[in-house]
Amino acid sequence: MNNNIYYSPNSMFDGFGRVFFYNGKVYRAISKESVKECLDLLNQPFFKELMDSCLIPKTIISDLSLPDVELILEHEKLLNIHQEEWGFSMFKDAALMILKVQNICEKYGYELKDAHTLNVLFKGSKPMYVDIGSFQKKEGKDWVAHEEFINSFYIPLCFWAEGKFYITRKILESKFYRMQTIPDQKFCDSGLFDLLEAKPFRYEVLFRGKVVHTTQNAKSAKRLSNRLNKIASLLKGRSARVSSAPIIFDDRSTITRKIESMEFPESVSLWKGYHSKFYGKEGEVELSDRFKNILGIIQKINSEDPLQSTLDLAGNEGLMSFLIKDRFNIPSVTLTDYDENAIEVACRNRKESNLDINILLLNFMFPPSIEDVSKRIKSDLVMALAVTHHLVLTSKFVLSTIFERVKAYSNKYVLIEFMPKGLWSIEHREEVAVPDFYTLDWFKDEFSKHFDILQIETLEENRILFVGKIKG
């Protein structure tokens, strides 16, 4: 059995117990020193309230056994979507969830000792706090993880809400940005805060413990504090440190109010509103024959070989994923796209529809790690619809690399569209020249090297669908 166990790479710092995966389920092996604490935790009123409120995954004592392990818990399984793959609404909801969990804990004399993003996963549109080893009895007046929450959630949201997408992405792509560097420099001392228009903090210049000046300008605060120390040193004839300029962040109630009021900044992007043409005046979906045919093919595959998961690569606002989840009994439906506007619309639609869909902000051709991402979101059926022509003709990808990427995400089946007229648009109908190599036979020959061809279906004037199955 031990050979089939896979320990979570993120479960490294918690002495409470290690998370591991076995037979498609999620477990936590509780350390010997924490067994009594864990059993007590499971019976605490705050823990029951958190579980009843769907703020933590369902957790039960497992009858699974391991050598030298007295207690094993089984947790509800959730897809591991990393922080850099969250949309704005997801990040905002996750931040508010952390604050809600902390408020519930405090009612019962407990608190969260960790408030970073690695402990948050999503069940559909609902964020959940997944590390039950991070609950502890509250001793001091202040929340021990207040500053970590600010660095992990509040500061990135401040940049995001101001429309500073690039800076936000760079922050979130580094999972350990909140940790101080060597030499000793914290996130708040990095100079990054100078780029924020609305500062979520202030500097208090203290002289012998009393506030003599308040400012949001780091340089002026430090300059005044240094002057006061120099004056004191001259008067005393020796080095004297009587002044400091600590950073004072907003309190929790202010932070909560500000986060609740934050909105996704509207911006221009290439694929913004791409799926809006499929909705009527009353918001009803108006399906084209192309979509109907694709859904029919998926239904046929699902009836012959029941699918456990689907993945829509570059799926824009996710119309196809929503239709699949609504119409077919497929447990896991995942949408990815690299356009933040499209993903934000998808997140809002998911909330309104209450459909349990996984959503990732992801460039499937350039993921941070293809091995990691493909392992997490690999699905029985993978779709790459209306995207290959852009990748080949605009981005200049080699066709074989596109098929290799799609194949890496699939367990069994693929649905990939070929556009014989290239970047030609059915709306404008203006002829667009395509390279000589860009032909149906060229596409078919390369496709057949990677997949067994099950069906080739002409859907529209510029849409030919290839249905394939991974060879072997």
Image (cartoon, rainbow, N blue to C red):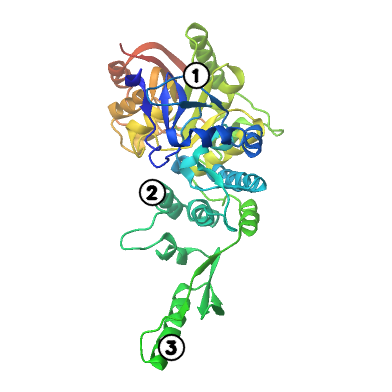
Instruction: Examine the rendered structure and indicate whether residue 443 appears above or below residue 354.
Output: above
Residue 458 at what x, y percent from top left? 45, 16
Mark 2 = which residue?
Answer: 174
Q: Using a 10 Å C-alpha cutoff, classify the residue at mark 3 as few (fewer than 14 neighbours), some (14 to 19) or many (20 or more).
A: some
Q: What's the distance in space between the residues labelled 1 and 3, CA to CA?
A: 67 Å
- Looking at the figure, which quarter contains the C terminus? top left
- Looking at the figure, which quarter contains the N terminus? top left
Relative placement, left or right, of 161 versus 166 is: right
The answer to whether marks 1 and 3 mark residues whose Cβ atoms lie closer than 8 Å is no
- Name the mark on residue 316: none
Relative placement, left or right, of 135 versus 51 is: left
Give me the residue at 46% from left, 19% from top: 64
Mark 3 = which residue?
Answer: 232
Amino acid type, mark 1: Asp
| Element on which disc 2 rests | loop
| Element on which disc 1 rests | loop
Give me the residue at 56% from left, 79% from top: 210
Instruction: Examine the rendered structure and indicate whether residue 358 appears above or below residue 268.
Output: above
Instruction: Examine the rendered structure and indicate whether residue 102 appears above or below residue 24.
Output: below
Residue 87 at what x, y percent from top left? 52, 42
Relative placement, left or right, of 449 versus 275 is: left
Residue 457 at what x, y percent from top left? 45, 14
Mark 1 = which residue?
Answer: 63
The reply to whether residue 317 is in sight is no
Q: Using a 10 Å C-alpha cutoff, classify the residue at mark 1 as few (fewer than 14 neighbours), some (14 to 19) or many (20 or more).
A: few
